[in-house]
């Protein structure tokens, strides 16, 4: 399991529009799913829940699903992880 030492919201705000490219996986679970931060992505601050045929956008501000669908237990685990790692 990957862990993140810095809160995600601060990373999203600090790195938006800078010269870092690509995306980074912040958390993997159930050997299929991952939470990714795409550093050069558009506002509002969010992460992507991907894997297993899902692509869900999770808000870092409201800790809610912004777009997409996934099994409820997968959404719950991802949102719990985001909530724990908020600023």
Image: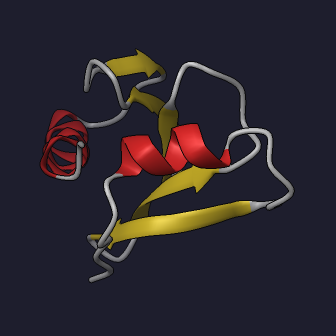
The image quarter containing residue 43 is: top right
Whether residue 5 is situated above or below residue 45 in the rendered picture:
below
Q: Quadrant of the C terminus?
A: top left
Q: Where is residue 63 in the image (x, y as percent from the top left)?
A: 25, 26
Residue 41 picture quarter: top right
Q: Which residue lies furthest to the bottom in this view?
A: 1
**In this view, which residue lies farthest toward the front?**
14
Percent coordinates x, y for residue 60 in the rendering: 36, 31
Total number of numbered discs in the rendering: 0
From the viewer's perspective, is residue 66 above or below residue 22? above
Q: Nearer the viewer, residue 25 or 16?
A: 16
Q: In this view, does 70 lie to the left or right of 55?
A: left
Image quadrant where one finds the N terminus: bottom left
- Seen at 51% across and 29% down, the residue is 45
Report if residue 52 is visible in the image.
Answer: no
Q: Compared with residue 29, is residue 15 higher up or lower down, i.e. above or below?
A: above
Q: Is residue 82 visible?
A: yes
Judging from the image, the colouring scheme is: secondary structure
What percent of the width, then of the height, locates residue 34? 43, 61
Is residue 55 rendered to the left or right of residue 35?
right
Q: Residue at x 16, y 41 (%)?
A: 83
In front of the other: 39 or 70: 39
Answer left or right for 44 relative to 20: left
| Horizontal and vertical percent position of residue 66 | 43, 16
30 left or right of 53 in image: left
The quadrant where residue 2 appears: bottom left
């Amino acid at each position: 399991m990957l862990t993140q030492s810095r809160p995600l919201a601060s990373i999203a705000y600090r790195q938006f529009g800078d010269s870092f490219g690509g995306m980074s996986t912040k958390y993997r679970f159930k050997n299929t799913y991952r939470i990714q931060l795409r550093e050069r992505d558009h506002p509002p601050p969010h992460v992507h829940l991907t894997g297993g045929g899902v692509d869900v956008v999770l808000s870092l501000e409201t800790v809610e699903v912004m777009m997409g669908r996934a099994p409820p237990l997968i959404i719950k685990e991802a949102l719990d992880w985001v909530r724990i790692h908020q600023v």
